[in-house]
Image: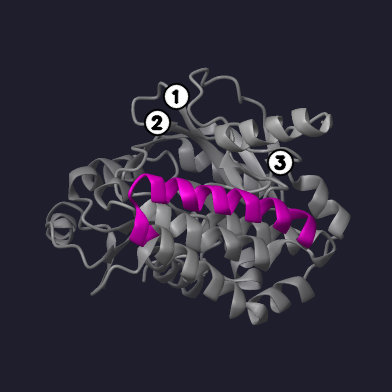
Amino acid sequence: MERSSNSVAVVVPNWNGADSLAACLDSLLKQSLSAHIIVVDNGSSDGSVELIKRDFLGVELIKQNTNKGYAGGVNPGFRLAIEGGFDYVAPFNNDAVADPSWLEELVGYLDAHSEVGIAACKLLNADGSAIDSTGDYYTVWGLPYPRGRGETDVDAYDARTEILAASGGASLYRVSMLEQIGLFDEDFFAYYEDVDLSFRAQLAGWKVAYVPAAVAYHQIGATSSRLRGFTTCQTLKNLPMLLYKNVPRRYLWRVAWRFILADTLFFWRALSRGLVWPAFKGTFMGKWRVLTGFGKRRRIQRSKTVSDEYIWGLLVHDLPPKAAALRRLRARWWRLTGTGKQSNKR
C-alpha cells in the first residue's frame, strides 16, 4: 500500500450506499489536505463495488462478503492504516460529505495537541440547516446524546472545547492511541461504538476535542431507516454494554439504577409501537453481553490511568435534553416527594 504524503487515511464503511457514495468520495478527494481513502464494503448488492472500480480508481477497496455493521466495516480500514504506518485515521460515513478543509482542520488540531487522541468536527444535517452533532456526551443516567442535535442555530457551538466523545460519522483518530486502547468493539455492530471508543480513550488518559472549523454534512439515518426496528434493537443491546464496560466501579451503581429505569421505559415504549421482536431481541442480547463481558470490563478498568472523580466530572449530571418521557416521569416524582435539585448541564 502506498503511504500518503501527509500520513492520513480516511475509512468509509459502505453497505448498499451507492446513491450517496459518489458524493461522499468526491468530497474526500477534494480535500485541501490529501489522504489515502479506503472503502470497506460490507457485501453490497446495489452496484457500490462496481461504482468504485469504475469511477474512483484511486480509492482502495476492501470487500467483505457479509454486512459486519459500522464497527466491522471500519476496523479493517483501521488495521490497514495501522499496518501502513499512518499517523491519523478518520472514519467517515458513506452518506456524508465534507467541506474542503474538514480534514486539514482536524489534522492541524491533533498536530498541535499531543494529549488529544480524537478530534470531532461540526457535523450538520445534509442541507446544513441544523446540527447533527458537535460531540457526544454521556449522562449519569447511562444515556449518551449528541450535543446540539436538531438545533437550527448552527453557529451556536463555535468554540473549541473538550468533549467526552466524538461521532464516528466524521472524526479523526490518532493511530498511536488506537494501538494502545484498541479499535471499535465489533460486538456493538452499529450505534454507540464511537462513544465506547472515546470513553475508553478518556479512561486511558487521552483527551477528546471538538474542532468547529472542521465541518461535514450527514444524511441522518439514511442507512438505518431502511430496516424497521433496527435502531430499537441496537439501542437496547448496546447501551447496557456501554455502561458496564466503561463506568468506574465507584460510580457504577449510581448510574446503573437510573439506567435500569430508562431502559425499562424505552423497552415498553418499543412494545407500544409494535416493535416486539426488536425490543425482546435487543434486551436479551444486551443482558447477555453484560453477563459475558467481565473480561472486557476488567481489561479496560485495570488499564485506567485517570481518577474515578475525573471521569465522574466528565459526565452530564442530568437527563439528555430530548428525553421528554423521562423528564416528565422525574417531574412527577419530584412533585410527589417534594424533592428536586439543580441540574448540572454541559
Q: Secondary structure at mark 1?
A: loop
The residue singled out by tag 2 in the image is 125
**Camera sees residue 154:** yes
Q: Give the residue drawn at x 40%, y 68%.
A: 72
Dots 1, 3 in contact, CB < 8 A: no
Q: Residue at x 45, y 44 (%)?
A: 33
Q: Position of residue 123 (x, y in %)?
A: 47, 35
Could you tell me the amino acid type at mark 2?
Asn
**What amino acid is labelled 1 in the image?**
Ala
Name which of mark 2 and mark 3 comes first in the sequence: 2
The residue where tag 1 is placed is 130
Residue under circle 3? 162
Tag nearer the camera, 1 or 3: 1
Residue 122: give x, y in percent of width and height: 52, 34
Distance from Cα at disc 2 to Cα at disc 1: 6 Å
**Furthest residue to the front?**
336
Position of 288 relative to 11 (above/below): below
- At label 3, counting other C-alpha atoms closer than 10 Å, the crowd grade (few under 14, some 14-19, many 20 or more) is some
